DNA sequence: CGTAACTGGTCTGCTGGACGGACCACCCGA
DNA sequence: TCGGGTGGTCCGTCCAGCAGACCAGTTACG
């Protein structure tokens, strides 16, 4: 159909834009400061009037944001005293550091190049730093993937948890969060790629090779296994895109 | 003063949050798709009603966004026919791929580690790819920096142009845009650091070494000069932060 | 050549979020 | 005990976004 050719050729043109109220933006900012450890349990926040002033929003907006975080248990509020950061560990909260869909706006080669550089480094660092508990978690995730059968959605959720667990072991939260965003590249379309017969098996085998190399603390082998994994993702995304082109 | 201790210790808690209307978000999305080449001059956009549907906004919002871009000369609009991408080159438009102040929410070590990995790679790639015109531009920027004297703001603007010019030569727009965002880390506070006597001279000398090594196509020397430049930035930011701590 | 289906252009009333301001009630240190 | 801080509540106004209706220009087709 001619009327939406550009939507087929540029699939990232569609999809909801990120809309966020000022209240949510303030809540997010506080949340990421807690998650990154810049705000720590027990820290007092500035008063509502002061926060409103430095954030250039109204006190009402600040109150709304604090209410959101109080409901989530991240912040403790009581009348007459300053709000405090609750005793909560948000270090595993996934943070999106890139703007909504920002990475989807780059072509496949740019994203693949970024993953080869940053993700391979992150995984290499994880080899040195990963602990026994995390290795066991990865092995448990492999067991789960083996038993999933043909459930694509469950496999993708497990795949994401597998990747994030390795990423988080690298010791640099900024690089961790950046590769998490890279991991999400064209996720809506990669669901289709994973539904292709054999795709989950291939992915599972890559994962097994990665965990075995991690267990051996074999950095070159881990790095090579990840490179192959990323190359497979690149190839299947490229093939999928070319199939979409010939269909329109 | 006790009442804003946390604001001194966590300076990134302050500062305006990013507020953006839906219209601006749509305009930004279209702009980055044009800048990254996903939408090319001459491409027809989908109709306003279709765009509104796939973006989940009202037609009014789409119209407002298209109006913004038409006023900027990025899109051509005429009644009765579909809007088109204008013949415009936005490849040098700086794109912020990270959310507002997202990087400021990480500590100095995380950002420094990310810069050492990504920025050093980007600069190394630029050695191979940089052309004669760009080298001349860098030399002209050095000349400008030498003549600036003590004008910190002008030096910083020139410094940014210098860095961006090298970053853009690397051949990967995603990595380019990411290091541009890393470059902006704690920029509001680094203005003070640059005002310290001798800081601009040191920075200028680093720049001279970088351009001379680029001219020789000496990748190890370029990489080493950048590492030293980044280490200097790290040290001055660390010292500044410690001074702020003892003052409160 | 006329017409229908597309396109962009204009306008209206409603809703929700943000705002500035005022005032109330609790907490704590001097 | 009191004053200056704090959070808690409420109100009227403004703006952006929305859905919808209708108008005018363009183009392809019969």
Image: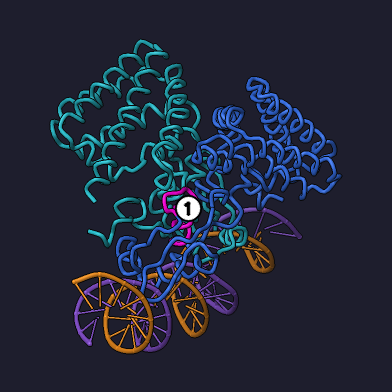
Chain colours: A blue, B cyan, C orange, D purple
Which residue in the structure is indicated by mark 1?
A32
- Chain assignment, label 1: A
Q: Position of residue B179 (x, y in %)?
A: 43, 34
Magenta-drawn stretch contains A33: yes
- Kindly report the secondary structure that dominates the magenta region of the rendered protein: helix
Q: Position of residue B97 (x, y in %)?
A: 47, 44
Would you say A207 lies left or right of C15 here?
right
Residue D22: which quarter of the image?
Answer: bottom right
Q: Which residues are magenta?
A: A26-40
- Up/down of C27 relative to A113, above or below: below
Residue B131: which quarter of the image?
Answer: top left
Q: Is residue B66 visible?
A: no
The 10 Å Cα crowd at callout 1, few under 14, some 14 to 19, many 20 or more, is: many
Which image quadrant: the N terminus of chain B? bottom left
Would you say B228 lies left or right of B49 here?
left
Residue drawn at x 29%, y 52% as measured from the top left? B8
- Up/down of B113 relative to A247, above or below: above
């Amino acid at each position: 159909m001619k009327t939406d050719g550009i939507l087929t050729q540029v699939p990232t043109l569609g999809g909801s834009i990120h809309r966020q109220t000022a209240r949510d933006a303030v809540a997010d900012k506080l949340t990421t400061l807690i998650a990154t450890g810049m705000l720590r349990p027990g820290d007092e926040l500035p008063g509502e009037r002061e926060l409103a002033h430095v954030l250039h929003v109204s006190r009402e907006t600040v109150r709304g944001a604090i209410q959101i975080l109080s409901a989530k248990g991240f912040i403790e509020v009581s009348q007459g005293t300053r709000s405090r950061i609750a005793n909560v560990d948000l270090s595993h909260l996934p943070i999106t550091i890139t703007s909504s869909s920002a990475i989807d706006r780059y072509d496949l080669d740019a994203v693949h190049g970024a993953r080869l550089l940053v993700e391979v480094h992150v995984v290499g660092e994880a080899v040195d730093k990963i602990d026994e508990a995390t290795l066991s978690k990865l092995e448990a995730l492999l067991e789960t993937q083996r038993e999933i059968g043909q459930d694509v959605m469950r496999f993708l959720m497990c795949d994401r948890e597998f990747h994030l667990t390795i990423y988080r072991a690298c010791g640099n939260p900024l690089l961790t969060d950046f590769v998490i965003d890279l991991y999400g590249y064209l996720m809506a379309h990669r669901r289709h790629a994973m539904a292709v017969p054999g795709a989950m098996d291939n992915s599972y085998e890559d994962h097994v090779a990665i965990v075995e190399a991690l267990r051996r603390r074999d950095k070159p082998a881990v790095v090579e296994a990840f490179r192959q994994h990323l190359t497979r993702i690149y190839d299947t995304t490229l093939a999928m895109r070319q199939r979409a082109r010939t269909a329109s």
